[in-house]
Amino acid sequence: MLPLIAEKPISLANPSGKVSRARFPNKFPRILQNGAPSLEVQLKHAWNPNDCPKDLKVKTDAPLTFHRNPIAESTHGIRGKQGYSGG
């Protein structure tokens, strides 16, 4: 378990805990204010179980999560149900 400071976990990727707002796009605060999308919207944009290699499986009990069986030197990927061209 990671150590806690003021009830916030320390990220191994960012141990100082300092976050520069310059790293985020201008629309980021607005996105955070909207809150989480509904489960229906999340499932619409979830991983596509029909478009992934054999070593990747979308979990049937958690369709927003996929599991990867490690294969040496594999570069397989998985696509979502919805395609995007930007933003």
Image (tube, rainbow, N blue to C red):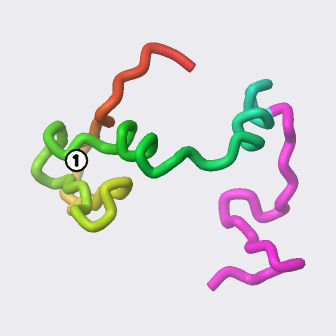
- The image quadrant that residue 13 belongs to is bottom right
Height in image: 61 above or below 24? below
Height in image: 34 above or below 19? above
SS state under label 1: loop
- Taking the spot 45% from the left edge, 41% from the top edge, the residue there is 41
Q: Residue furthest left?
A: 54
> Can you give x and y, in whole percent of width and height, for residue 53 in the image?
14, 44
The quarter of the picture where the C terminus appears is top right
- Taking the spot 68% from the left edge, 47% from the top edge, the residue there is 35
Q: Which residues are magenta?
A: 1-22
Left or right of 65 on screen, residue 31: right
Report which residue position mark 1 lands on. 74
User: Residue 43 or 79: which is nearer the viewer?
Assistant: 43
> Can you give x and y, in whole percent of width and height, for residue 62 in the image?
33, 63
- The image quadrant that residue 79 belongs to is top left
Q: Is residue 21 magenta?
A: yes
> Can you give x and y, in whole percent of width and height, for residue 8 in the image?
79, 73
The quarter of the picture where the N terminus appears is bottom right
User: Residue 40 or 80: which is nearer the viewer?
Assistant: 40
Height in image: 28 above or below 85? below
Height in image: 37 above or below 9? above
> Can you give x and y, in whole percent of width and height, for residue 4 in the image?
79, 81
Q: Given the image, on which type of amino acid does mark 1 rest?
A: Ser
- Taking the spot 84% from the left edge, 48% from the top edge, the residue there is 19
Q: How many marks?
A: 1
Q: Is residue 3 magenta?
A: yes
Mainly helix, strand or loop, the magenta region? loop
For label 1, the crowd category at 10 Å Cα-Cα, with few meaning under 14, some 14 to 19 and many 20 or more, is few
- Taking the spot 82% from the left edge, 79% from the top edge, the residue there is 7
